[in-house]
Image (cartoon, rainbow, N blue to C red):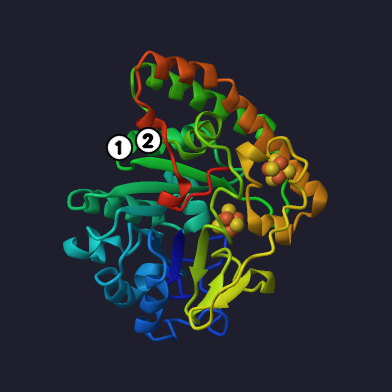
Amino acid sequence: MLWFLYTTGCCNLKCKYCGGSFPERIIPKIPTYNIQQLLDFLNQYKSKRIFFYGGEPLLNKKFIEKIIFRVNAKRIGLQTNGILLNKIGREMLNKFDVILISIDGREKITDKYRGKGVYKKVIENVKHIRKIFKGEIIARMTVTEDTDIYEDVNHLLKLGLFDKIHWQLNVIWCEKWNVSTWANRSYFKGLKKLLKMFLKALKRGIVLKIVPIMGIINTFIFKPFTHVPCGAGKYSFTIDTNGRILACPIAVYESWAILGDIYKGLNELKDVKKYCFRCSYFKHCGGRCLYAQYENFWGIDGFKEVCKITIKTIKLIEKIIPTVYDCLNKRVVRIKDLYYNPLNDSTEVIP
Ligand code: SF4
Ligand code: SF4
């Protein structure tokens, strides 16, 4: 199981995607519950992963400190915008197994959406922690119509600072934009180039840790998805600063997503998957995003438009599966290097 813990509803940036801090009445600035109560609640769950989340989680470093040295977890992670990473001491830093940092690729793309100077500050901080941090660092990109997926992923890979690269398309939870035109003009061409690069490296025994590629390959050679890859509402839950348990970390306003609280416990989610029941790609897609299924701001046509992109992405990856098997059979790569469990990293796999 994966537990996201909101440390605060505040953020020190105002990215165009989400607009910064939550209203205090929805997500209070600091947890309003007793920390021992949280630890007692979490202790019921044996094999758990804990990921600190926000707002910007490092704005409440004190809370993280109180949890991180006391919680019993098999993996601890942090999802951060990276601005305050230089403020964490070596001891606390190395309690994390993985740190996911929001960065959208090249400087001009990142700064356009996250604010001027963000790219430089984040890179400076990543270089700083690289010298002392023993865990994994994952770049977490949001992809918009300004993204050139090949250029931006490649840019981050070439920096040599990130162990893995993950991206998600900025769709459905934002204003409608013409994602299909962009995908046909730019995205699929870039994706094909990335896949070519992935295969070239694979044949030399190197697995490029590009999460959407690895994650989808896994559904062909290891285990198909039976639920949304992020695990929302079934394998992953969020505890906000009120002590509420939510199915998905971004669903702070939606009543369907409230699954209980740390005082009374966790209830089951009524999973809808209404668009996915008859989809033959479900085992490779998992329904993509639970929040999008419930809220579906773009309507059924908009949802289907994104599905077309997902299906084409899966088909492109399916084409490389014989070569992947070939590399495995010839022992050019080890099976364990290809295995990927998104719950270990709190990633969504499907862009
Ligand atoms: S492609 Fe669309 S319909 Fe099919 S499983 Fe994914 S989200 Fe559901
Ligand atoms: S992919 Fe969707 S359901 Fe899963 S965590 Fe992200 S927003 Fe929530």
Which residue occupies 68% across, 36% down? 281
The residue where tag 1 is placed is 160
Q: Can residue 179 be seen in the rendering of this structure?
A: no
Residue nearest the observer in this picture, 125 or 348: 348
Disc 2 element: helix
Q: In what quadrant of the picture does the C terminus appear?
A: top right
The quarter of the picture where residue 157 lies is: top left
Q: Amino acid at mark 1?
A: Gly
Marks 1 and 2, Cα distance to the nearest angstrom?
6 Å
Task: Work out whether 228 lies above or below 33.
Answer: above
The quadrant of the picture showing ligand 2 is bottom right
Which residue occupies 52% across, 55% down? 113
Residue nearest the observer in this picture, 167 or 202: 202
Task: Work out whether 67 lies above or below 346.
Answer: below
Would you call the spot at circle 1 few (<14 residues within 10 Å), some (14-19), or many (20 or more)? few
Q: Amino acid at mark 2?
A: Leu
Q: Are marks 1 and 2 in contact (CB under 8 Å)?
A: yes
Q: Position of residue 328 (x, y in %)?
A: 41, 19
The residue where tag 2 is placed is 157
